Amino acid sequence: MVIGEGKPIEEVLSMISDKKKILVVGCRGCVTVCSAGGEKEVSILSSAIRLAREKEGNPIEIREETIERQCDNEYVEELRGYIDEYDAVLSMACGVGVQFLAERYRKIPIYPALNTTFIGGTLEQGVWVERCQACGNCILDKTGGICPVARCSKSLMNGPCGGSSNGKCEINPEIDCVWQLIYDRLKELGTLEIFEEVVPIKDWSTSRDGGPRRIDREDLKL
Amino acid sequence: MRAQYPANIRIIKLPCTGKVSEIHMLKAFESGADGVYLVGCEEGNCHFLTGNLRARKRVERVKRILEHIGIEPERLAMYNLSAGEGTRFVQYAKEMTEKIRELGPTPIKPKKQEIGTERFEVQ
């Protein structure tokens, strides 16, 4: 899922400093799972904003809503009935959600309450790690299900480099050398011969390097 | 026991401090509370095992929020004691009252609590 993190509250307050009435919208998707922008976080942020504004003698009115997903227009449309009543909208979704709201509601500023950080998963409650770089050309079949694009500091296709030491990376000693992990996994799977196959130079044009991406599924279009 | 504790404290009883969420603490301040404190079981002796530990973490989080928005984090506190320690309960109540007295009244004007009037309309 997409992982995000709440922006410092001072930054959020400065975005809405001249607004009197705002709508704070959460998302029940990824940001709920990573405890950054779900219904709970909407109520906490709204309460904190009200307290801060009350303290400086500049009270603010806030409506709190959470929709199923902000990355699907059918849910974004649900706000249409009342969104015009507000001076601004604070979206607690990932960057996609903020943009979908902005495209749909052109006359009202939509501000991001989160910093969207990476694509990852939950290691344990409260810990999320990056696992995928969305490179567009997955080679996980060749690396025992462990991604060198996302997890190798150098994104090597054929590792490890000379800096791999005691299973740790020379660039960032706090992370595991992912090529060590790949070697161990392929050994566990009994398929070490895959390790010796040379993976050719990566064609990065399928990644963001090739420009903003789009998928058109003609078979699914109405 | 009939020990006396300061009259300015409003007690909200819960089965466990683990029931307290960040929003409850923040809403108490929004309602005009000068101070908020939690009293839970001794750490390691929570009846529900980890409720008081979760509460402690949530209290720390809200203290950080208060700090960032310019409200003294000392207005929020958490104490631990055993259910039988009446004297300690009184001691904490007096301690907190004194602390808040020193800090002064809350900078927040209490938000008027709206009670849904629709429910009470008689046809």
Image (spheres, rainbow, N blue to C red):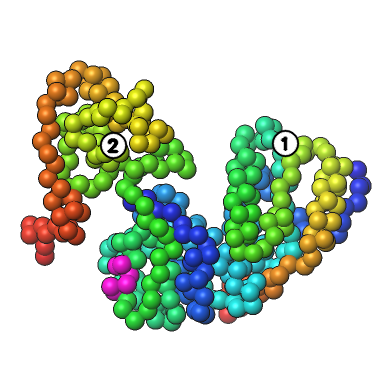
Instruction: Tell me if residue B38 comes above or below residue A189 in the rendering.
Output: below
Instruction: Name the residue located 91 percent from the left edge and 51 percent from the top edge.
Output: B4
Please indicate whether residue B58 sits to the left or right of residue A198 in the image.
right
Tell me residue B94's x, y (percent).
85, 52
Q: Is residue A129 visible?
A: yes
Main SS class of the magenta portion in the image: helix
What amino acid is at disc 2?
Cys
Please indicate whether residue A52 sits to the left or right of residue B77 in the image.
left
The numbered mark at residue A152 is: 2
Please indicate whether residue A147 sits to the left or right of residue B45 in the image.
left
Crowd rating for badge 1 (residues with CA inside 10 Å; few <14, some 14–19, many 20+)? some
Q: Chain of mark 2?
A: A
What amino acid is at disc 1?
Glu
Q: Report the span colored magenta.
A: A99-104
Check if mark 1 and mark 2 are on a common chain. no
Q: Residue A193 colored magenta?
A: no
Q: CA distance from mark 1 to mark 2?
A: 45 Å
Q: Is residue A220 visible?
A: no
